[in-house]
Image (cartoon, rainbow, N blue to C red):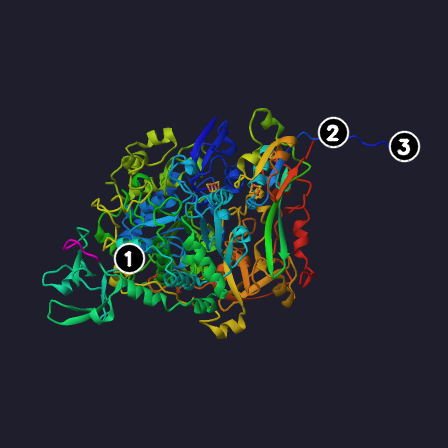
Amino acid sequence: MIVRTTAWSAGPGCHGGCGVLAHIEDGKLVKIEGDPDHPINRGRLCARCLAMTQYVDHPERLRSPRKRVGERGENKWVDISWEEAYDLIEEKMGNIREEYGPESMVFSMGTGRDVGAWICLLAYNYGSPNVMFALSGIGCYSPRIAASETVLGDYCVFDGGQWLPKGHDDPRYEVPETIVIWGYNINASCPDNIFGHWVTDLMKKGSKVICIDPRLSFFASRADKWLQLRPGTDGALAMGFLNVLINEGLYDRAFVEKWTNAPHLIRSDTGTLLRASDLIAGGSPDDFVVWDTVSGAPVIWDSANQEFRSPGVAPALEIPADQCAVHLADESSVPVKTVWSTFCAEVAKYPVDRVAKITWLKPEDIIEAARLYANSKPATIQWGVAIDMTPAITPTSMAIAALWCITGNLDTPGGQVIARPAFGAVAYALPGQRGPIKLPDMESDKTRIARDRYGVLSEFIWRAQTDVTLEQIFTGKPYPVKGMWIQACNLIGGIGYDPKRWVKALKKLDFVCVVDTFMTPTAELADIVLPAATFLEKDGIRSWWTPLESIVKAMEVDGCRPDNEINFELAKRFNPDIKWANLHELLDEIVSPSGMTFDELAERGWELPPDGDPSAPYLRHERGLLRPDGKPGFKTPSGKMELYSVLRERWGFEPLPHHEEPPFSPVSSPELYEQYPLILSTGRRSPVYFNSEHRNIPWLREVDPDPVVELHPETGASLGIGDGEWVWIENMFGKCRLKAKLTPIVPRWMASATHGWWYPEHEGAEPSLRGVWDSSTNQLLPMGYQGKDGLGTHAKCTLCKVYRAHTAPPGAYALPGGGVIGGATSTAATGAGPAPGHAARRGGVSTGSGKEA
Amino acid sequence: MVTKRKAKAPECGLLIDYEYCTGCYACQVACAQEHHWPAGMGGIRVQEVVQALPNDRAYLAFIPFPTELCVLCAARTRKGLQPACVQHCMAACMKYGKIEDLVKEMTKPRMVLWAPRA
Ligand code: SF4
Ligand code: SF4
Ligand code: SF4
């Protein structure tokens, strides 16, 4: 039997969406292949999905709910039935709700995958608004989405033709002349719902590449322009690009005039937007004002009706200094300037020479890259998680969004295509979207952790702020946190910074439940562990972004249950009035905007929205497809793309893009830089792992057997470190042990470390916790350094020193069973992977110091 | 007396456009899955090659190398299917075919034609 379905966690781990054909014999997975017809992957499949036979049948896979019998972290368990597990959870979480209120339970998720919807389903029906994405500063993806929503009312991705039925062959499509790969080794991880190899497809068709990355990636090697910037200075670079574009007139002035709020006026006295309520008695504070060059007078922009209050207005982008006073309703007169002048003045603070100093780039490289991007039609930017890895994530994203827009690439074929969930079918609240899974009322959201401190959390990101949550576990203020539900989330071994503090935090709680496919360092600290099913063992849907896809159950693994079934069952127990009789009714409601039921969708496999649907390209702002009222324009307060953000002004944050130095850098902490003279960038991706997963899958582990830190050969030589030697990476917060890989693909001033390392093969009980303290780079990253708006972090731009470790971590790795899953034995080494003898070899100290210098 | 061993001329091969090989290792795992190789063995091994260049530059390349264990997916190709590695190659940079045809497709630099077996 061959079952056609969609890959989306659990299992491959990535943001998924690839179409697969699962070959099932006697209820077992015997082979998995790419679906040749599928619009995302067209028959291809990456290593993670191809290794699914080793995943589903893994001997260490959790196959029964278990209950802790020793102390937390003692790794003493007894298997219990599902019924008993549900009863226990109902009792423990029920007690917390009764005694402290539902908000005292926090629901923790890892990278945004299928499980997000189901965690919300459980949390919201239990009554808690505290769903937490466990990374410091919520620092992955949602800050970029929220920033883009803030200024544009929508999010954008690069256009690889992915949303057209015929892909590249669609007559509407244009191959991008230039693709900017910004902070992204996109082919390795397929993150953010983008299939990385769409870029190689387009390179073959002639697209040029600008690669912004301190490390020589595949793309950097083949780029027409490679900018090897200092980590954490992306904001300065984006401002430098804007500076070149504006000074050289390389922008689309017609777009700026028509579609942005560039002509809106700003009061020079307060520095805030001039509103109709300032101008006339009874004017609305939601309406803005422009300077009409025809009448030589201010005219009101009616935001609700998306029109000027008088006909034939020609708004000024710049007003001459001698004509710029406006009479206000209170009879006073105030000097004004346009948003455009203010934006340009901010951009002018970033002349290329200054940007070169900040970013450690050459001025001519910045100028040439900016010109190449601006002169290419169409051109597109695909940005990665590196952008989130700065506390000034929002102002940085605003600068990059301004680049898309003022170059006229917005929602154009081969440009920056607006990304919406197919047919608007969403399961739960995401930035800019609401689905059927929601809190009973807005009142219940009031207690969400740090919601009121950070405006963006009340508007776009429906999460508890992570750093504040951790503090609250210790302070109990303003209310105690008493329990955590942790699902598909390796808080201790993967996503949590300062993991030792998280261990303390978990130990303070009355109740911890972990749902996962394998034991992890996090699961070791739970009271109850539930065994989750993989994507092959469940029904579900995916609408992130398009097409709308179905996930269908191809098989079952005894004892395991799908996340959505587990959470539905518990949601029903905590809220007997739940709206849906069963999970399939809920799936039906989620997909209903497409006009299909779940079964109808499953029959088809996937469905692309037709032209004219707001989730189908192109030029939707011109066609009135973005705003609820059907008028042309954007879903922002002014209806324009906002170069000066109305919402940021309201929230009390800088309304303009800019650069801020990360907290630990040669510039912001020169004393620390003397002690820790290398820039530490963690999170170098592996093409075979997704974050902290898959180290126990033999076919994958043999590709990347050890945690690696890449150092330039000269840096290695100067530190007496040889290739393949174990080294300590240390800074003011902690240290970890990785294996040095000396390679000229990294700059001399950087240590590029792999993240998410723990050793599934090591002892589960404390102090080992599956070896997490050996090689977890998160020990060098403190919590509590999020940006001013609660977002953004620093995993890719901190400081460290590196020195020889002389020893390997204990219990070095050998492939299970001599290399085979299921008991067969492996014999030979072929040179590429670890082999018998590998473990012994790596324990020794290399004498190769300096040999590559 | 030494007699010259007569090797049969290979008929089919794999054409790799390594300019586009991203080092995703899909081919390696696809082969292991198809032929049930344990970790540590397989029909194809991806090698990373970093070449330092003048002026402090470097070039990063990946080369998928068919090993002694590559059988050119005879069972698949007989059925008209592509070899497992070729089908799943994320960069679509591998081609299977008759050597005489593949030679004609070597129309750009940075390509290699492997003839792993007769
Ligand atoms: S990118 Fe890889 S892991 Fe993710 S769904 Fe596609 S094939 Fe599977
Ligand atoms: S052709 Fe078949 S046997 Fe040879 S490497 Fe590819 S998948 Fe393996
Ligand atoms: S699958 Fe293709 S792109 Fe990936 S490593 Fe193999 S040859 Fe290279």
**Residue at disc 1, CB closer than 8 Å to ligand 1:** no
Amino acid type, residue under disc 1 in the picture: Glu
Q: Which residue is mark 3?
A: B1
Q: Are marks 3 and 1 in contact (CB under 8 Å)?
A: no
- Rounded to the nearest whole Å, what is the CA distance between mark 3 and mark 1? 86 Å
Residue shown at 27% from the left, 52% from the top: A98
Front-lying residue, A450 or A670:
A670
Tell me which chain the residue with mark 1 is part of. A
- Residue A39: quarter of image: top left
- Rounded to the nearest whole Å, what is the CA distance between mark 2 and mark 1? 69 Å
**Residue at disc 3, CB closer than 8 Å to ligand 2:** no
Picture layout, residue A206 above or below residue A581: below
- Residue A346: quarter of image: bottom left
Picture layout, residue A190 above or below residue B69: below
Picture layout, residue A676 above or below residue A510: below
Picture disc at residue B100: none
Q: Which residue is mark 2?
A: B8
SS of the residue under disc 3: loop
**Nearest to viewer (mark 2 / mark 3):** 2
Range drawn in magenta: A308-314
Q: Which residue is mark 1?
A: A642
* Of callouts 2 and 3, the N-terminal one: 3
**Nearest to viewer (mark 3 / mark 1):** 1
Q: Position of residue A124 (x, y in %)?
A: 28, 47
Is A41 colored magenta in this rendering? no
Front-lying residue, A68 or B31:
B31
Please indicate whether residue A480 sits to the left or right of residue B101 in the image. Answer: left
Q: Position of residue B61 (x, y in %)?
A: 60, 49
SS of the residue under disc 2: loop
Amino acid type, residue under disc 3 in the picture: Met
